[in-house]
Image (spheres, helix red, strand yellow):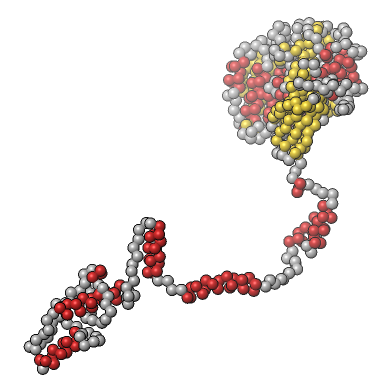
């Protein structure tokens, strides 16, 4: 079975001592880690070890943007709990507008319209010197500081009501009213004029503050406040006289120093003397939050302070077992959200305690405080520990978490999830709708469906190819159990070759010994590149290979030497092959005694000449010469070979009346007859 220890909470207090009463109330049942806002983790993986987070009067300007985004992931995707406790620097008064905190809250930050709030006058004094035209690298690398200041000023004006007064002054070496102090009316006109601000020039804070103080003193506003922003060092001025005038007329001053080049000492001194707040930031993204925060504090319109008794509007596990509720003296004004559950309200019907399901997590909003300023009667109330214990327990879902026991097993590149669900008495929980939300090391979120494979067992898998830590929120929902869940994690290690072995040095030494090598430490690692290795020589006999090659080539050598294959042999072979394949072909017959067509033609001519000579009559004694004309053959087929020598003529070049005497064998040859004829004439 699963054994659960005390729930572990991360408590973030806006100022030292804010969470003292809460920590004392929860100490016996919950393990608490108390941190300041600047030490809140910026990585969602750092929040996995906590069951929930409690923010105690924490302004958004004191938290890093990454911290708020990580908290949102932990609540929405990993099912962690969140409790937001109010105070004079929380909710709208804490600049939660346009932050992840606003998205997570079960209440809206709009001010209830039915409240009767005194008018406020606010003057925004903004540095427009040349240094404000420099791009700020923490917001996409291309946004100038003057542009961020303009956005902040527009947002600050937008937080005020129509009956409030606002004015905007820019300064370099001179002051310039962008919008003179006047009732806001339509905020769009302010936004348009603020958007026309440009930068250039030096820095003289005094010339910018002085007209702002005079304008506020002359205004009809009940509350008067100045917000000064600069990023440079100012020229000297009569600041003491200006502060004295502000103090006599109820004008307060807050200062914002942007970047390390600002005169931080002067800005801190002005804020302290002006009974305001000093801000230093290197992140231009924080400017809109700071200005909105100052706008709310100056107006104090969201801080509603008068005694009243809370009224219940809906049942909630947070209020189980609690009787009458003590009196409350103040809270931060908010409005209900459609999907939020409002459990306690003020005498005006404004939310005091609200709760809802946000993604896989739960969020509780308490708009009063947890110290003696507004909830003094609650701090001393005997039900105070139970109230906060149940609020934290509901947000973390710890009351039913022991019904499921999830496990993860890595199998190659796949992670297999197994969940066993059972009642405390051992009865299996079947038919649950189970799933797991997986947050990869790259913070990409995916959902895995868990199917029931046996009694009380649910299984699923997901690819785990990315190295690093995976976070999982396993959830199961049933008609009898409601929604229950647990968070766990699994780490995909690096490849085995990158792992550090305990016997790594011994293994390296053994490898070096086997190969006759050496080992080096970090101090002499460069020696591994020295060219001092021992030269090793070895020989290999090649005669077996060469002998085998000679044996294989001998038959080919004999064949080449003994066989004579002519072109005619190839032709006859091709004709024979065609004949056998039935594709035609002609076999050229061999002629006896003729090895070439030219010799065969000569033999044919000789035979024809002999035939003509035998057919002629014997010559008379008076004949002086026997003319002989032999017609050469005109076609190759007229040339036929003969078996004896005869008259040879030039083929293709016949000559009329030309005789050639060719010696032959036998008495009846042409030469013999001619010789006999000459003898008779002589």
Q: How many tags in the picture?
A: 0
Q: Relative to 271, is 411 above or below? A: below
Looking at the picture, tell me which residue is in the foreground, 31 or 473.
473
- 389 and 416: which one is in front? 416
Image-quadrant location for residue 398 = top right
Relative side of 265 to 131, left or right:
right
Res. 342 image quadrant: top right
Quarter of the image where the C terminus is located = bottom left
Task: Please report the residue visible at 63 percent of the width from the left and 29 percent of the height from the top.
Answer: 146
Location of residue 511 (image quadrant): bottom right
What's the residue at 40%, 61% (across, down)? 577
Q: Position of residue 344 (x, y in %)?
A: 79, 10
Tell me the residue at 73%/69% (across/down).
536
**Rendered position, 95 above or below 620:** above
Q: Residue at x 62, y 15 (%)?
A: 187
Confirm whether residue 131 shows in the render: no
Image location of residue 659, percent across then percent down? 17, 82
Residue 339 rendering spot, x and y as whole percentages: 71, 14
Q: Nearer the viewer, residue 287 or 165?
A: 287
Front position in the image: 586 or 285: 586
Instruction: Point out the image quarter for the N terminus.
Output: top right
Q: Is residue 163 visible?
A: yes
- Vertical placement of 450 versus 188: above or below? below
User: Above or below — where is 192 with respect to 586?
Assistant: above
Percent coordinates x, y for residue 639 in the rendering: 25, 72
Furthest toward the bottom, the residue is: 682
């Amino acid at each position: 079975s699963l054994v659960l220890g005390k729930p572990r909470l991360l408590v973030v207090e806006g100022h030292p001592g804010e969470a003292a009463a809460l920590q004392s109330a929860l100490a016996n049942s919950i393990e608490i880690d108390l941190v300041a806002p600047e030490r809140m983790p910026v990585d969602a993986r750092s929040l996995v070890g906590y069951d929930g987070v409690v923010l105690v009067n924490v302004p958004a300007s004191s938290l890093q943007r990454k911290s708020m985004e990580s908290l949102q992931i932990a609540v929405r995707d990993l099912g962690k709990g969140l409790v937001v406790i109010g105070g004079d620097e929380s909710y709208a008064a804490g600049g939660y507008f346009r932050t992840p905190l606003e998205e997570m809250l079960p209440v809206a930050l709009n001010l209830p319209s039915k409240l009767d709030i005194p008018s406020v006058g606010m003057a925004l004094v903004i540095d427009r010197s040349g240094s404000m035209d420099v791009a700020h690298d923490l917001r996409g690398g291309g946004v100038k500081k003057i542009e961020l200041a303009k956005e902040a000023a527009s947002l600050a004006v937008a937080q005020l009501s129509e009956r409030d007064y606002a004015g905007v002054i820019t300064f370099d070496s001179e002051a310039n009213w962008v919008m003179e102090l006047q009732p806001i009316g339509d905020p769009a006109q302010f936004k348009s004029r603020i958007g026309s601000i440009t930068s250039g020039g030096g820095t003289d804070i005094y010339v910018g503050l002085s007209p702002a103080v005079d304008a506020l003193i002359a205004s009809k506003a009940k509350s008067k406040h100045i917000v000064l922003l600069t990023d440079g060092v100012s020229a000297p001025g009569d600041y003491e006289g200006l502060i004295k005038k502000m103090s006599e007329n109820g004008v307060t001053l807050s200062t914002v120093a942007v970047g390390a080049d600002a005169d931080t000492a002067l800005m801190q001194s002005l804020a302290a003397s002006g009974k305001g707040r000093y801000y230093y930031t290197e992140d231009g993204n924080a400017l809109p939050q700071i200005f909105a925060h100052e706008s709310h504090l100056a107006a104090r319109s969201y801080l509603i302070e008068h005694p009243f008794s809370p009224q219940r509007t809906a049942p909630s596990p947070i209020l189980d077992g609690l009787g009458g509720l003590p009196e409350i003296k103040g809270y931060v004004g908010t409005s209900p959200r459609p999907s939020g559950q409002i459990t306690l309200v003020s005498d005006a019907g404004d939310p005091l305690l609200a709760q809802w399901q946000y993604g896989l997590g739960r969020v509780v909003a308490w708009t009063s405080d947890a110290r003696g300023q507004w909830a003094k009667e609650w701090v001393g109330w005997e039900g105070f520990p139970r109230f906060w214990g149940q609020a934290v327990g509901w947000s973390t879902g710890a009351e039913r978490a022991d019904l499921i026991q999830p496990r993860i097993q890595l199998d190659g590149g796949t992670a297999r999830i197994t969940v066993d669900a059972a009642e405390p008495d051992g009865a299996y929980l079947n038919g649950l709708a189970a799933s797991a939300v997986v947050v990869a090391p790259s913070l990409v979120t995916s959902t895995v469906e868990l199917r029931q494979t046996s009694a009380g067992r649910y299984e699923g898998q997901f690819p785990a190819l990315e190295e690093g830590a995976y976070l999982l929120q396993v959830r199961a929902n049933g008609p009898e159990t409601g929604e229950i869940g647990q968070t766990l994690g699994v780490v995909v290690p690096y490849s085995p070759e990158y792992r550090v072995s305990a016997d790594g040095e011994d293994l390296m030494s053994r490898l070096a010994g086997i190969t006759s090598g050496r080992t080096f430490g970090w101090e002499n690692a460069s020696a591994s590149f020295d060219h001092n290795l021992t030269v090793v020589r070895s020989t290999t006999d090649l005669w077996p290979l060469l002998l085998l090659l000679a044996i294989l080539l001998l038959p080919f050598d004999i064949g080449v030497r003994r066989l004579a294959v002519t072109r005619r042999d190839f032709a006859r072979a091709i004709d024979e092959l065609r004949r056998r394949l039935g594709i035609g072909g002609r076999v050229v017959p061999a002629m006896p005694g003729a090895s070439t067509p030219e010799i065969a033609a000569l033999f044919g001519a000789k035979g024809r000449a002999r035939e003509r000579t035998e057919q002629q009559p014997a010559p008379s004694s008076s004949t002086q010469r026997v003319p002989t004309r032999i017609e050469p053959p005109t076609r190759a087929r007229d040339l036929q070979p003969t078996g004896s020598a005869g008259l040879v003529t030039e083929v293709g070049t016949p000559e009329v009346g030309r005789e050639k005497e060719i010696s032959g064998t036998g008495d009846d040859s042409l030469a013999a007859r001619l010789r006999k004829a000459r003898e008779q004439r002589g």
